[in-house]
Image: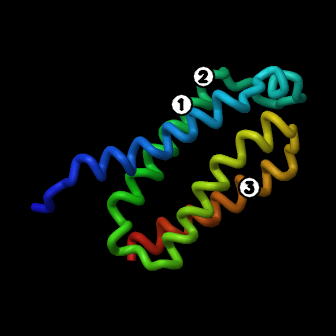
Amino acid sequence: MKKIDIGSFLFHLLTPILLGMAVGLIFNDFDYIDSLNKTIDVPKIVFPIVWSVLYLLIGYWYHNYEKEATTRNKVIYYILLGLNFVFTPVLFYFHNIILALIIVVVLLIGNIYLLIDSIK
């Protein structure tokens, strides 16, 4: 059975979520989102829950695969993590929906790549 380093595990798990929370607290502007013409009205509580789960999964992935990950995958991971943090100010502060959409598409493609590569 693999021994778990609790300190490293907590660091990798909590760092993305704490940084994400900080960025969210600095740049949240739900009034902007409320002003948009939306086809679906999602409760405001959904956004922080979904992103918190996403950040926990990001930290969990890195903790489990950092030793096996290639340098290329580590670079991709950090780029995707940076894009996750950039998304919030792009959408909520700069109100740039097109750039936010591009970021989401890049995140989706990058995360699918890392997932498939991790399964190998």
The quadrant the N terminus occupies is bottom left
Say which amino acid is labelled 1. Ile
Q: Does label 3 or label 1 sit earlier along the sequence?
A: 1
- Please give the name of the residue rendered at 36% of the width and 66% of the height, measured from the top-left corner: 65
- Please give the name of the residue rendered at 66% of the width and 22% of the height, measured from the top-left corner: 44
- Above or below for 107 versus 31: below
Q: Secondary structure at mark 3?
A: helix
Depth check: give the residue in front, 112 or 95: 95
Say which amino acid is labelled 3. Ile
Q: Spatial distance from mark 2 to mark 1, Cα to Cα? A: 7 Å
Depth check: give the residue in front, 9 or 60: 9
Res. 94 image quadrant: top right
- Please give the name of the residue rendered at 46% of the width and 74% of the height, measured from the top-left corner: 117
Q: Does label 3 or label 2 sit earlier along the sequence?
A: 2
Query: Residue 99: x, y in percent?
Result: 83, 52
Query: Residue 102: x, y in percent?
Result: 79, 57
Say which amino acid is labelled 2. Ile
The crowd level at tag 2 (other Cα within 10 Å; few <14, some 14-19, many 20+) is few
Relative side of 7 to 56, left or right: left
Query: Residue 32: x, y in percent?
Result: 84, 26
- The reply to whether callout 2 and callout 1 are in contact (CB within 8 Å) is yes
Q: Spatial distance from mark 3 to mark 1, Cα to Cα? A: 19 Å
- The reply to whether callout 3 and callout 2 are in contact (CB within 8 Å) is no
Q: Residue 72 shows which numbered tag?
A: none
Circle 3 sits on which residue? 103
- Above or below for 16 versus 65: above
Q: Looking at the image, what colour scheme do you see?
A: rainbow
Circle 1 sits on which residue? 49
- The reply to whether callout 3 and callout 1 are in contact (CB within 8 Å) is no
Query: Residue 41: x, y in percent?
Result: 75, 24
Circle 2 sits on which residue? 45
The crowd level at tag 1 (other Cα within 10 Å; few <14, some 14-19, many 20+) is few
